[in-house]
Image (cartoon, rainbow, N blue to C red):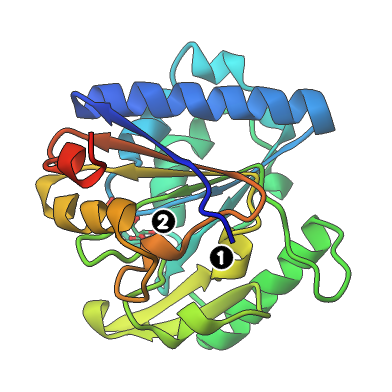
């Protein structure tokens, strides 16, 4: 499978990362709304997208995006209640979703509070099938999937050498993650690689070594982010200078 050409934008600051990512989000949304009348996006968690979510909730993006036709999903979720400080839903709700005119029915939360994470993952897969009108075996094609990358190269909640990396059928999984000593819910690689567009936002010097590996070396379960290679979609990275350390050498530039 030919590697998608990844475009890498190095930005000078957290504010620049938020601005560039908001522009890309709004542009992708606009094209999807014009082409299909709706925009389906999977949000990422962690700290990096905070600036993007806050920027999208402010002008001009708050008015530029027709939020009433946006459908929001998540790439992953921690197994905590939706009001827990660690909840990816809470992060997006506080910074963005509570501040724009998105329709409640269009917010598709992963039920991190569920007592049975496997059941919550299966329910989420069923919700994807319904929301995207999928037949058995079909995968949802998101217009945009936002992803981050941990210092260990994980993305969504797909961690190095996790059995979840070998999943080829299920759309969502629950996994016990030793690194965080807890369960996580996550979309699987087949879903990530079906997206029309994947945008990674990466910031911080602790990501630099893995980022070079992702962009220079061949895909490996050592670095799950390197396994995100949209089959019929674009792959983009927006990274800050700290994360981009040594990247020019890695890219042979
Ligand atoms: C999560 C995210 C995860 C995140 C990376 C980077 O639930 O934590 O989905 O994949 O993107 O861990 O996190 P930071 O942005 O906090 O560095």
At 59% from the left edge and 61% from the top edge, which residue is drawn?
A: 1
Residue 17: x and y in percent read 30, 28
Question: Could one spot residue 56 in this view of the protein?
Answer: no
> Where 10 sits versus 157, above or below?
above
At 33% from the left edge and 39% from the top edge, which residue is drawn?
A: 50
Ligand 1 rendered quadrant:
bottom left
**60 on left or right of 32:** left
Q: Residue furthest front?
A: 252
User: Is disc 1 placed on a helix, strand or loop?
Assistant: loop
At 55% from the left edge and 79% from the top edge, which residue is drawn?
A: 173
Write down the quadrant of residue 77 in the picture. Answer: bottom left
> Where 185 sits versus 74, above or below?
below
Spatial distance from mark 1 to mark 2, Cα to Cα? 9 Å
**191 on left or right of 198:** right
User: Is disc 2 placed on a helix, strand or loop?
Assistant: helix
Is mark 1 in CB contact (under 8 Å) with mark 2?
Answer: yes
At 22% from the left edge and 59% from the top edge, which residue is drawn?
A: 210
Give the crowd class for mark 2: few <14, some 14-19, many >=20 residues within 10 Å. many
- The numbered disc on residue 110 is 1
């Amino acid at each position: 499978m030919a590697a998608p050409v990844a475009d890498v934008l190095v930005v000078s600051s957290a504010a620049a990362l938020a601005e560039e990512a908001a522009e890309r989000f709004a542009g992708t949304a606009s094209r999807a709304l014009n082409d299909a009348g709706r925009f389906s996006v999977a949000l990422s968690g962690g700290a990096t997208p905070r600036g993007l979510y806050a920027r999208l909730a402010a002008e001009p993006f708050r008015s530029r995006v027709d939020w009433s036709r946006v459908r929001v999903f998540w790439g992953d979720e921690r197994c905590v209640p939706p009001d827990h400080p660690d909840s990816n839903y809470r992060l997006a709700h506080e910074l963005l979703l509570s501040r724009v005119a998105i329709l409640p029915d269009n917010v598709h939360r992963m039920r991190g509070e569920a007592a049975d994470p496997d059941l919550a993952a299966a329910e989420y897969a069923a919700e994807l099938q319904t929301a995207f009108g999928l037949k058995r075996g079909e995968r949802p094609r998101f217009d945009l999937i936002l992803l981050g990358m941990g210092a260990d190269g994980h993305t969504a909640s797909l961690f190095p050498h996790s059995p979840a990396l070998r999943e080829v059928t299920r759309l969502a999984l629950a996994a016990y993650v030793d690194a965080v000593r807890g369960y996580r819910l996550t979309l699987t690689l087949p879903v990530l690689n079906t997206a029309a567009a994947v945008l990674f936002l990466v910031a911080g010097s602790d990501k630099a070594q893995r980022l070079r590996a992702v962009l220079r070396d061949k895909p490996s379960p050592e670095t799950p982010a390197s396994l995100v290679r949209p089959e019929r979609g674009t792959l983009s990275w927006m990274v800050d200078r700290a994360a981009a350390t040594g990247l020019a050498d890695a890219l042979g530039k």
